Amino acid sequence: MLRLAWPVLLEQILITLVGLADLWLTGNFLEQPHLAAIGFMSYVLWLIPSTFGAVAIGATALTARFVGAGQRDDASRVANQALLIGVAFAAVVTLAVGCGGGLFVGALRLPADAAPLAERYLWLLTPVIGAMMAEQVGIACLRGAGDTLSGFVAMALVNVVNIAVGACLVMGLGPFPKLGWDGLAIGTACGYLVGAAVILGLLVRGRAGLRLRWSLLRPDRELIGRLLRIGVPGGTDMLLVVCCHLWFVSIINSLGTLAAAAHGLGVRIESLAYLPGSAFHVAAATLTGQYLGAGDYRRAVQGVRMACLVGGGVMVSAGLLFFFCGEALTSVFLGSSNRATAELTVPLLKVVAVSMPSLALSIILTGALRGAGDTRWPLVFTLVGFLGVRIPAAYLLAWDEVPLSWLGLTLPGLGLGVMGAWYAMVADVVLRSLLVLWRFTHGGWSRLRV
């Protein structure tokens, strides 16, 4: 478990460092509208790769099953077919973002001074959406085969390029022009291009028993059907989570630039706690898939329990850091001109710290279910948590009044602002953790045929 988890943990740390570096550059060299825009873009950079989740989740589950059963050739076929499907997905997403990016930003109620910045960033990012897909799907295949080190190496190079190019272009260091906001977007785009080149290069040469071959890139209807049967519910789950997060952030954006900036900063800092969760999510998915492929249910359960124990312990420790050191954390990223943002963010970190045990269970156990191919139940839990709790509660807790235009009514709200929205977020996380824990203890995931 640790051999699988530690490279992913380091990989996630590097990814987070890029986001934090962008946040630091924005907070120290740009203005409050840029902070609101960079917070919004953190969601967009989560949304776009999630559109390839249907391919990535199915690829991880099937690859792990075949590797566990000792069928490496079939695992290699999965990798080739996954990338083939990914190309089609990437073409659709690129067209959608290129044509509707401005409408998308407008629909999410980003403040007027921040919306043009987000549109500009998105426009600069659109040409590298295909690279995002290749990186996402390729790493998913390698993880299913038990190789989590390659993703770490690729992301190390990605982060060096991203931070170096972004910092040089924002500040105008050396021979680089001073591009400000555009420099952040260009650095991100360069990083994705490097990541895709590294992962595709490894697969062309052959890695962990997986290899790209022209002969295996012809469409295999049966295998594509198996991939999508597992991946579509899981990918829909991922996409729904992100879309609901965007709906959630639109509620916060409507509260003004200060609330949007504080939320963006809080989310960036909170992402530190996702690092061990993401690492042990991957470890649980790989262990579950491979042990079920080998017919060893007992070891699958033991692996998942250990992932929850270790990963959850680290996440709870991060929660304690948020609760007691929130002011110090916010001061790292903001200059003196953004003190109002810092003062509003510190209480948010205290609120989210309480949810760390529940968040750990939700993330890691969902990984275990996906690794087993059980992707439908997590989708149901997402619908219940977000649409039944988080979104309606955010409206009622954050706004003074909630208009129900289709009924001609207006409900009174508590008017707690961004703090109320974060209370709703914690309630949702707690509920979903209980639901996914029930599904895991039920054991139905172990009897699925993929």
Image (tube, rainbow, N blue to C red):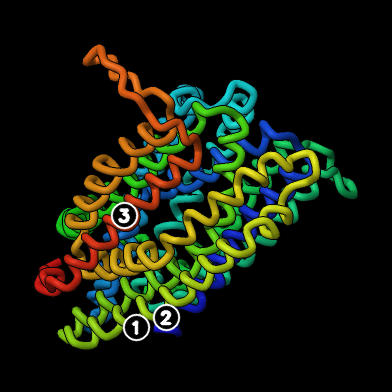
Would you say the residues marked 2 and 1 are in contact, meaning their CB atoms lie under 8 Å apart?
yes
Give the amino acid type for the residue marked by disc 3 in the picture. Answer: Val
Which residue is under mark 3?
55
Q: Residues within 10 Å of mark 2 (few under 14, many from 20)?
A: some
The residue under the point 60% across, 57% down is 194
Task: Give whichever of 411, 293 is nearer the camera.
Answer: 411
Which residue is under mark 2?
310
Would you say the residues marked 3 and 2 are in contact, meaning their CB atoms lie under 8 Å apart?
no
The quadrant holding residue 157 is: bottom right
Which residue is under mark 1?
306
The quadrant of the image that shows the C terminus is bottom left
| Distance from Cα at disc 3 to Cα at disc 1 | 27 Å
The residue under the point 43% across, 67% down is 277
Judged from this view, the residue extending furthest toward the top is 408
Q: In the image, residue 84 lies at what x, y percent?
A: 34, 52
The residue under the point 18% across, 55% down is 376
**Numbered disc 2: secondary structure:** helix
Q: In the image, residue 374 lies at what x, y percent?
A: 19, 63
**Numbered disc 3: secondary structure:** helix
* Mark before the other along the chain sequence, 3 or 2: 3
Q: Is residue 413 above or below residue 439?
A: above
**106 sits to left or right of 412:** right
Residue 382 at least partly seen = yes
**444 sits to left or right of 200:** left
Give the amino acid type for the residue marked by disc 1 in the picture. Answer: Met
| Distance from Cα at disc 3 to Cα at disc 2 | 29 Å
